[in-house]
Amino acid sequence: MTKARQIKLGAFLMTDGHHIAGWRHPRATANANVRVDHYLRLARLAEAAKLDAIFLSDSLGVRDTNLDSVHRTSRNVGFEPLTLLSALSVVTHNIGLIGTASTSFNEPFHIARKFASLDQLSGGRAGWNLVTSSGEEEARNFNLDEHIPHADRYDRARECIEVVKGLWNSWEDDAFQRDKVSGTYFDPDKLHVLNHRGKHFKVKGPLNVARSPQGHPVVVQAGASEDGRSLAGESAEAIFCAHRTLAEARAFYADIKTRAARDPDHVKIMPGVFPVIGRTEAEAREKFEELQSLIHPAVGLQLLSVVAGVGDLSGYDLDGPLPDLPETNGPKSRQQLVIDAARRDNLTIRQLYLSIAGARGHWQVVGTAEQIADQLEERFRKEGADGFNIMAPHLPGGLEDFIEQVVPILQERGLFRTEYEGTTLRENLGLPFPTHPAARDERLIAEAAE
């Protein structure tokens, strides 16, 4: 009997919360970005609720260089994702550990080795969120005066992922015999040297980390531009995206599933959702407005400038319309999302920055636990998502609210698990084990000989 499709849930942990002023909330840990115990608590909380994964984003620089705004926010320092996830792997057993690494400013060997190591440390629970980096400030930390053009970044990313996956296949699953009697540690026939030579990379290999219980880390991707969708269709096993309306979500979902050159169910689409929960709808609105009241205008305006990919909107009237924007070399899909929202809803610049202060263009839901569960179910059943990355407005309180109030409703409806399906991230996401190419070739030869 085929098991009914269920929602996948990730905890997207942004230091003290996703609202730009979340650090000022009474239930937020204001110094979360230097507190490993804060993350240990959140990891245990998420795993106890049977969530699929913890997700950490990353930036290779301080994105906001406007001192008038940056000194009022908590987004300037934090842990490097893989270092933190390695610590979290020790206190968890089932929940996935997804970290971000840029293909623009990392070599593929580094990415392959670090994530394969996390995969081994965690017993097969690692995931790599592939990004190409969107900020000019990141490029300036890597010997560049300006960022690599958007199309070139994706060209490099496409080759990078090919090399990373090739390195992850350096060893077959049963390569290591460790036979003390014969003195044979590994079977030399099960070692594969990559010898890659391409446009961007020259990598001999092999990787000096063995394959893990899930084969290799799950590949996650976060781009939604045309280049990003193309790459996701080719390579991603899970996609983190941002859509405000059901129509947008359904269109993206259908597009990616069509592009996928494999079973569409083996590509999990998990948009971000920013929930504010109250015992009544009025209370939820009150909670949301409390957060909004904590935003300093300089912070809101700079956030909008960064998300829109234009650098500086300070010369425009806050209570006037969003001007026509030049095409960004940064996050193109996010810029378009902001422009569409401004034009569709006739928003002023002030109204626009208030609308993205929490979710940064992701789906924002404010209401009771039942109302939020209803909306998640609708988007899931109408093929707008396979699951969701929960973006708590403040931490730990916002995640506690979602787990204590919304998760039980989803479980009662049969929409979310009550126990983990397995111990690896692939097993829990319902993704297939990546058969080693050599084993696949041997099987095909055997089948042909029958």
Image: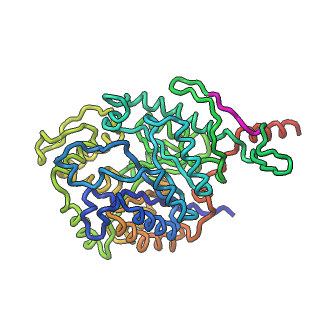
| As drawn, 165 above or below 286 | above
Residue 429: % across, % down: 57, 56
Residue 265: % across, % down: 58, 50
Colour mode of the rendering: rainbow
Q: Which of the 4 image quarters holds residue 105? A: top left
Measuring 53% from the left and 34% from the top, which residue is drawn there? 160
Q: Closer to the camera, 444 or 66?
A: 66
Q: Which of the 4 image quarters holds residue 405? A: bottom left
Q: Residue furthest bottom?
A: 279
Measuring 88% from the left and 36% from the top, which residue is drawn there? 449
- 191 magenta-colored: yes
Which of the image's four quarters has the N terminus?
bottom right
Q: Horizontal placement of 449 versus 62: left or right?
A: right
Q: Closer to the camera, 187 or 277?
A: 187
Q: Closer to the camera, 330 or 211?
A: 211
What range is drawn magenta here? Answer: 189-195
| As drawn, 139 above or below 363 | above
Q: Horizontal placement of 151 versus 137: left or right?
A: right
| As drawn, 377 above or below 138 | below
Q: Horizontal placement of 354 versus 445: left or right?
A: left
Residue 444: % across, % down: 79, 38
Q: Horizontal placement of 196 versus 413: left or right?
A: right
Measuring 26% from the left and 66% from the top, which residue is drawn there? 25
Residue 177: % across, % down: 78, 48
| Residue 415 seen from this side | no
Q: Which of the 4 image quarters holds residue 450? A: top right
